[in-house]
Structures are given as C-alpha cells and as structure tokens.
Amino acid sequence: MESNKISCAAIAKIKEICEAHNNDAGELINILHETQNTLGYLPREVQVEVAKNLNIPATRVNGVVSFYAFFTEKPKGKHPISVCLGTACYVRGSDKVLEEVKKVLGIEVGETTPDGVFSLDCLRCVGACGLAPVLTISGKVYGNVDPKNVRKILENPEFTK
Amino acid sequence: MEQNKINISIDNRPVSVNPGTTILDAAKSCGIEIPTLCHINLEGTCVNNHPASCRLCVVEVAGRRNLAPACATTCTEGMEVHTNTLRVLKARRTILELILSNHPHDCLICRKSGNCELQSLARKLKIHEAPFEGGEKSCHELDKSVSIVRDMNKCILCRRCETMCNDVQTVGAIGANGRGFNTTISPAFGLKLSESECTYCGQCVAVCPVGALTEVDNTNRLIKDLANPDKTVIVQTAPAVRVAIGEEFGLPAGTIVTGKLVSALRKLGFNYVFDTDFAADLTIMEEGSELLERLKKFLDGDKSVPMPILTSCCPAWVNFFEHQFPDMLDIPSTARSPQQMFGSIAKTYWAEKMGIPREQLVVVSVMPCLAKKYECGRDEFKVNGNPDVDYSLSTRELAALIKEANMDLKSMDDSDFDNPLGASTGASVIFGATGGVMEAALRTAYELYTGKTLDKVEFESVRGLEGIRHASVNLNGFELKVGIAHGLGNARRMLEDIRSGKSEYHAIEIMACPGGCIGGGGQPLHHGDVEIINARRKAVYEEDRNKPLRKSHENPYIQQLYEEFLGKPLSEKAHALLHTNYFNKSK
C-alpha cells in the first residue's frame, strides 16, 4: 500500500527517535513531536513508519495526529502565519484580518502558498490581548493589525528572501 | 446482611452488590434497565466497551451535585440512587435530543430500522420533535466493501466498533480520526475499508447500535436468481444459523429450527436445500488427515514440518494472518473452509452427476458471518471467473427475506435436507461453537490414528467460553496437545507464542468471533446479552447429541464422495478442489 515516498534518511531518523523512546507506544505523542520538529510535518508515509516502529496500527497514530491541532499532515510554509481568533482578538475584528490574509495569499486555513513561503493557521490567544487583534509570522507577534495593513506586512521583503 | 457486600438503594429498592459493581450493573441485577447506547459487556468473553461517552445512563445520586453516569460510577455503601426523577428524565431527554440533532432522520429507509438502539430509545422516550437545529453537519461518503457498509453520517461515536476492532480483535482497521464535529471512526488516512487491514469479521457490525455499520445485502440478487427459470439455485446453511435464526421470529435464543429452516428455504424456491455441515464433515476428513500426516512426519523426526497445525475454516482468521502474520503462512492447514469445499464439490461432483452446466448453477450460502461474503469473491475460489460459491447471505438477511416472502418460520413444518450434500454428522454441527472444529477433528483423528473406537465422543475439555483453552488427548501413549482460541486478540497471543517458540501445541483451532460462529457478525443482534450466545452454544451441542452419527468419517455420503470421486483424503484431486494457498497481504 505504502510506496517509499520518504527518504532512507527520514526512515532512519524516525527509527532513531522511536528507539530513543524504547519503541514505547505510550510515548507516541512525544515521538510525533520530535518527528515533526525534525521533518517539518507528518505525512501519511511518516505516520505509517512510526506505527511500524512502535508495532501499533496506523489508525492509532493517525488518530492522534488528526486530533491535535499542533500536528500537521501537510508541509508548513517557510513562514507559518497564525491568526489569533481568541475572544479579545475576535471582538476587535481578527475574523476580518483572517479574511484579508486569505484573500492576499489566495489560500485557506491549513494550506500553504504554492511557492512554499507562507502557511496559514488559526490559534486561540498568544497572551497578547492588549495588542488585539494579533497575528504571528514565524513566531513574531504583529499587534493592532488593521485588515488594510495586512498586504503591507506580508509584502515585507524579508519573507521573500 | 452479607459480609463484603455493598448495600445501596435504587429507586427505593434495597440492592446488595459486590464491591466495584457499577450502578448500571447493580440496577440490571434488580431488573432496572438504565438506557445506554455505548456500554456493552459480554460477560465471560473479552468484549467490554465502557467509554461513558453517550451519557444516556445518567442517574441522580443523593448528596451528589451533578448527575452521575451509571456505567462509570461504582456503588458505595449507603448510596441512594434514583433513575427516574424529573431531573434525570429531563437530562436524558436532552442528551438524546442532542444526539439526534446530528443524526439523519431517515429511519423509514434505514437498513437498521426496527433493530436500531437509537430508534428504540427515541421511541421509548417519546421524542417527537427535533428542538436542536444545526446538526447533520457530516456528509461522509458511503464506504461499501464486499462485506461491510460504512455510513458514517449515522455514527453516534459510541466507540463500540473501535473497541471490537482494536481491543478485542487487535486488528486496528478502524479508529477515531479528527476531533469535534469532524470526528469519524474510520481506517487511517480516510482510506476505505477495502484498503485497510479489515478482516471482515463483522464484529463492529454486530455491536453497532445504529445504522452506521451494516452488511452488504445480497437479498435482491437472490430473489432475481430464484425467479430465473434458466438457473438451478442451491443453498447451503452453516451450522450456527439453525440455532439463531429463530430469534428473529420471536423464538427464545437457542431454539433449534433446522427442519423449519429447510422448509422455509424450499418454499422460497431453492431447487435443492443442502447443508454446509456436509462440507464440515469433509473438512474434518481433509484437515484431520493433514494433521495426522504432519504429526507422523514430525514424530519421525522431520523437523522441517511446520507445527502446530492451525485450523483454516474461518475466513476472517485467514484474512487476519495474511495481513498480520505473513511470515507464518505455512502453519495453517491448507484445507479450504466448509463453505468453499461445499461450493467446489457442488460445482464439480454434484453438477456433473446432475448434468447441470457450471454457469447455470447458482450456489448460495447462508452464513452467520460477513467475512464469508468476502471469501466467496477470492480469486483462488473461481474457475474461469465463475465463483464456487456465488454469494453469501447472513442469518439476518435470510430472516428478513423469509418475512418479506410472507412466511413465518415458526409455523413451518419440519423437513429434511436434500441428499447427498445435505447429510451430516453431529461432529459437523458443533463447528458452530468455539472448540467444535477441534472436537470434531479429535473424534476422527483419534479413531483413525489409534484404530480404536471412542467410548465417549464428547471432549468436554475443549468446550467453554474462555478465550484460550487447552487439552491433551492420549493417542496410543502419545500426548496430543491441542489449543483453542476465539476472538482474534486471543489468536494473536497464540501466534506470538508460536513465533517465539513458546507454543507446545500440536494443533490449534482459531475462530475470529467471540463464541465462535454462533457469535458471528451476521447473526441476529445480541444487543450485549451474553446469555443469547450461551443459549446458542448449548443448542449446538444438543443438536450434536440428537444426531445418529456423530463422527465425520462415518458420514455415508462422505464415504461415497471419496469412493466415487475424490479417491482418498489429500489425494491429488482433493488437493486441487479442497485445498488452497495463502497470500502475504501485509501493508
């Protein structure tokens, strides 16, 4: 069923991570964390490989990956964008900010731009409610975002370098 | 007052229970049925689902602020429980209304209508309005495999199927995916069942409270074939069907209706009504001979002989080891299942005898099983694309068809199967219960090996409901060690022991379903009542006692089949028609 779409290096890396956790299925979440940190995302082939190492069904790995918003099955952009939809940001119009980001980049939430520069996600509160509405790009927080300024933020040349 | 008992009151009735008992079980013990949609516990087997997810079993406990889920709350001394206060009834109604808000309201045309636990509960609670809007968000595609249909729009996330597939069967084909409204129980990565490790055992279907998991319905195909004058349509019925189908017509569980079943099948229009039991006797001849042959080589010091030998009657079990233990494909017996042996003999020996061309002969099976539907379609059981068994109906489908044809099984007269493929012994009928194939094999193997006649044909030690059982039989001074496992989780344990060299058995019987075929995925739904399984089990052994012949090798029509056609067990012809190969299907 599975073609070997992932590299031998990735397979070796997954094996190493699983072994570091004694191939213990109880460590699945930690293993997936490390695997995602190393490989960037968790495509189907990677999940199958993790399942094989831990000797558990792929359904169980996929169940965990698809449950937690932190895990992603698609590659993230070079600069991941997160728009806060927490209460404070929402009442100050972050839904409009989100719409504007979608419009400017031409992608939906959970997707990545074709050039691989940006990916778009939502989150609930980054702890900067005083700056609402906020979005983050590669972990950097942008506060008091006006939908009108979104294009300017995204066209910053440092992102396309 | 008994020592070590916990005394509580439920609806003002005093109840005394063992420590650790849940309120749900305590209530059940005094005849109070608290409704639940997720809980299921087949006591004495490993089937137990208790996620406390549906919340319908909430009750009021005096002194407790919130309502307690009865299935997940253990009784404590002096506890005062109320199951029908205004507060409980209102909460239960709201919970049910919320479940219904995300469930299609197409009961009239639902496959599960009339047998749906959600529908029954909605009727019991008199839900006539849908106060919560905004549901029915899910729009999943129908996933139709050759055996099982998944309609996830109807799923209420009770997790019973997930428990069966993962904890009981250890197959891991389906599990929860996503979260919130997007949660589905599905194979990994949203694949179809046919692309997963599914064995088609049908245990998920057997416990699904709603219409989310049902079987592929072959009834209409059968009705068309029966009406076609150019076709000769014959039927075989499995051992476990005759002790269960009566339930669908209001008879108590465990009522034996063999004669009535034969009459009903004849009235439906089958040209010949035969019995899978005949093929079960044939299976014993082949599988028993294979056991003795392997054993002889093994005892002569040939260490290349794979031991132990495993039975191969159960198609879900075959799927299981093909998917999960591809390194051990040489261990199971090569004998085909009784269903396939029947088809093979019917379309060769019998068809030639009767002068019926293969393409005009339709072989239908009635099985307690959903994996049999898959088995019919396996390529190795076809000749030039024409399958040995054309298709299979479950016990439930046949019951529905009998009703649709305006017949009542209860009022049928008794009649006998047609010969020659309808003749059978008591050894074959016990195939329906876990341990039965082994017992039947022992009856024949003992007599063939020792040349002596058994004083007592019953091997009580292989009977029972325990997940893994073992026994030893003295064959002229040689201790033959046999094992029995039912439920694929237990089968896995057996296989892992064999793989690691820890197994001491010479022969092992494995059945995929808890209880064996009597608890199969195609049987009338037990709705969590283990007494139904027990009653069917007793009936199978009673049917065995009622038979004049009780050893497969004494079946005169089996003897005739070998004389006229096959030669002897394991002959070249027998190998070609009655044995098979296994394939590595690991993902």
Image (cartoon, helix red, strand yellow):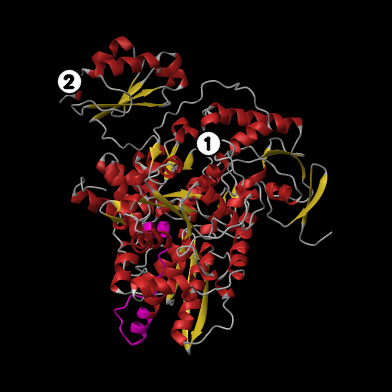
**Can you say which quadrant of the picture contains the N terminus of chain B?**
bottom right
Query: To which quarter of the image does residue B575 belong?
Result: bottom left
- Secondary structure state at the residue bearing disc 1: loop
Say which residue label 1 marks: B156
Above or below for B212 versus A122: below
Q: Residue at x 52, y 36 (%)?
A: B156
Name the spot of residue A93 as percent of width and height, x first.
41, 13
| Residue that extends furthest to the top in the rendered view of this protein | A148
Magenta range is: B293-319
SS label for mark 2: helix
The chain letter under disc 2 is A
Query: Which image quadrant for residue B351?
Result: bottom left
Numbered disc 1: what chain?
B
Q: Is residue B17 above or below residue B556?
A: above
Can the viewer see residue B555?
yes
Q: Where does residue B489 sit, x and y in percent of width and height?
A: 46, 59
Which residue occupies the foreground of this view, A44 or B65?
Answer: A44
Residue at the spot of label 2: A157
